[in-house]
Image (cartoon, rainbow, N blue to C red):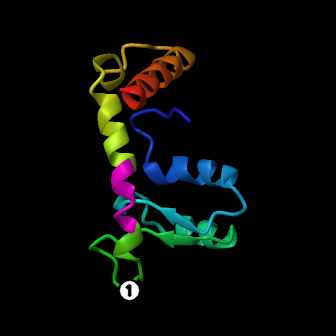
Amino acid sequence: MLTGGNVADCIAAETLLERLPPHALVVLGDKGYDSTALREQVKRLGAFPNIPPRKKRKRRIFWCRDFYRDRNAIERMFGRLKDVCRIATRYDRRADVLLSAVTLAATVSCWL
């Protein structure tokens, strides 16, 4: 899903969670996804929201650091994709052309 740069992470996540597979047990996210509404949506889908709380939260929320470490692989993948200048600066104006560039870059980075 491609969103504008001015769209908050939580808004896009609500739409993407509708596509969550039914066998998902844990949903990982960074502090940008820390909202009560998003956590409740994940729980309704039958998964555990493993999202670290923001510092401004008054109530402590449990999250597992061991599961959160697995997010590192996703962050490294996005880092590799952003090494491609065309993707990092988003030269392509059409979403389908950008998706094809991301697909090609992901294929090449995994192949090498």
The region drawn magenta spans 68-73
| Residue at image mark 1 | 59
Q: Is residue 45 visible?
A: yes
Q: Give the percent coordinates (x, y) of residue 101.
A: 46, 18
Q: Give the percent coordinates (x, y) of residue 99.
A: 52, 23
Instruction: Find residue 85 and report its image quarter.
Output: top left
| Pick the front one: 71 or 86 | 71
| Residue lying at 41% horizontally and 77% vertically, measured from the top left | 63
Query: Quick check: 87 left or right of 48?
Result: left
User: Label 1's element?
Assistant: loop
Chief secondary structure of the magenta portion: helix
Query: Quick check: 102 left or right of 60?
Result: right
Instruction: Find residue 14 and report its image quarter.
Output: bottom right
Amino acid type for the residue under numbered disc 1: Arg
Query: Quick check: 23 left or right of 28?
Result: right
Residue 94 counted in the magenta span: no
Q: Is residue 50 above or below residue 4?
A: below
Q: Give the percent coordinates (x, y) of residue 57.
A: 34, 77
- Residue lying farthest to the front in this orientation: 112
